[in-house]
């Protein structure tokens, strides 16, 4: 199976993600600080640096995020686009998180699907 097929298998719609969020899934925001400031945030989402996924989610590491309960946990990753979230979801799968998925359309699609958001902190130039 190619890497692209694996990523596609992990890609879900914003509506599917919204239902998972309502169920209390671990929601991971991998956007930059500037991205969050310019478009807003989702309350309860855990901000993770894409470069630190192995440290933040290593199943046997003491440095693992406290919100991570185990490799069977449902995890939804979002970014500004699938180019940011896809590689993170793939890394999580390699680490053993079999229920890690990412959102087609990213943050904006989640907002449009009715997920509660806050912000943006910085107003975009008109």
Image: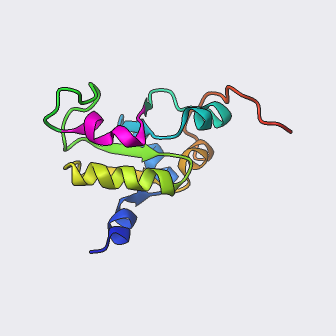
Q: Overall secondary structure of the magenta stretch?
A: helix
User: Residue 120 lies in what quarter of the image?
Assistant: top right
Looking at the rendered structure, the number of numbered marks drawn on it comes to 0
Looking at the image, residue 9 sits to the left or right of residue 110; the answer is: left
Q: Position of residue 123 (x, y in %)?
A: 76, 30
Residue furthest right as drawn: 126
Inspect this view and state whether residue 36 appears.
Answer: yes
Q: Position of residue 82 (x, y in %)?
A: 49, 56
The quadrant of the picture occupied by the C terminus is top right
Q: Position of residue 115 (x, y in %)?
A: 54, 38
Image color mode: rainbow
Q: Is residue 51 magenta?
A: yes
The quadrant of the picture occupied by the N terminus is bottom left
Q: Is residue 95 above or below residue 42?
A: below
Q: Is residue 72 above or below residue 87?
A: above
Residue bounds of the magenta highlight: 47-58
Residue furthest left as drawn: 60
Q: Residue at x 21, y 32 (%)?
A: 69
Inspect this view and state whether residue 99 appears.
Answer: no
Q: Residue at x 26, y 36 (%)?
A: 55
Foreground: 104 or 62?
62
Looking at the image, residue 41 sits to the left or right of residue 53; the answer is: right
Foreground: 13 or 4?
4
Q: Residue at x 32, y 55 (%)?
A: 90
Residue furthest front as drawn: 51
Q: Residue at x 46, y 40 (%)?
A: 30
Q: Is residue 3 magenta?
A: no
């Amino acid at each position: 199976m190619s890497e692209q097929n694996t990523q596609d298998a992990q890609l879900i719609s914003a509506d599917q993600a919204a239902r998972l969020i309502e169920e209390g899934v671990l929601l991971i925001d991998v956007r930059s600080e500037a991205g969050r400031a310019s478009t807003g945030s989702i309350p309860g989402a855990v901000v993770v640096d894409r470069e630190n996924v192995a440290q933040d989610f290593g199943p046997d590491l003491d440095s693992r995020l406290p919100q991570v309960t185990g490799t069977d946990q449902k995890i939804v990753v979002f970014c500004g686009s699938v180019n940011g979230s896809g590689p993170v979801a793939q890394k999580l799968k390699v680490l053993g998180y079999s229920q890690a998925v990412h959102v087609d359309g990213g943050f904006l699609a989640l907002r449009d699907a009715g997920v509660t958001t806050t912000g943006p902190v910085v107003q975009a130039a008109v």
